[in-house]
Image: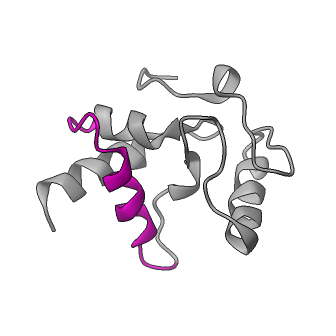
Amino acid sequence: MSDFDLQIYAVLAKIPFGRVCTYGDVAKMAGYPRHARHVGKLLSALPKGSSLPWFRVINAKGQISLTGDKLSIQRELLRKEGIGVSESGAISLRRFRWDGEPV
């Protein structure tokens, strides 16, 4: 496993319950600004059943990037944490975005 992978996983593990980050936020907090796409690719390769909260990561527009069944799964996981998510997968970054500070 690369240093990049480990740093991304470390940030991912810190995203608090009831909060979201963008792919770019995760990359920046891990020390790899401008690597948002790499974060997305890494998260898409997580093994099924991973305990890391992958579902707390969304795109910079405040939307779930996944489609179909995966969008439904991510939307439901976020809703279980009290995060307001529209049927299309839109989330208020202003309200739910985590900036890396302790909550």
- Reply above or below: 29 against 47: above
Residue closest to the eye, 18 or 91: 91
Residue 101 vertical position relative to residue 29 in the rendered view, above or below: above
Where residue 39 sits: x, y (%)?
A: 36, 53
Residue visible at 74% across and 73% down in the picture: 69
- Does 36 lie within the magenta span? yes
What's the coloring here?
one colour
Q: Quadrant of the N terminus?
A: bottom left
Q: Position of residue 5 (x, y in %)?
A: 23, 58
Q: Which residue is drawn at the image coordinates 46% and 23% (left, top)?
A: 99
- The correct choice, above or below, for 25 with respect to 13 in the image is above
Per the rendered image, the range of residues in magenta is 29-48
Q: Is 23 on the left-hand or right-hand side of 28?
A: right
Residue beneath the point at 42% across and 56% down? 40
Q: Closer to the camera, 60 or 83?
A: 60
Kindly indicate the quadrant of the structure image that contains residue 23: top left
| Residue 5 on the magenta segment | no
Horizontal side, residue 42 vs residue 88: left or right? left
Q: Residue at x 54, y 35 (%)?
A: 60
Q: Position of residue 58 (x, y in %)?
A: 57, 45
Q: Residue furthest bottom?
A: 48
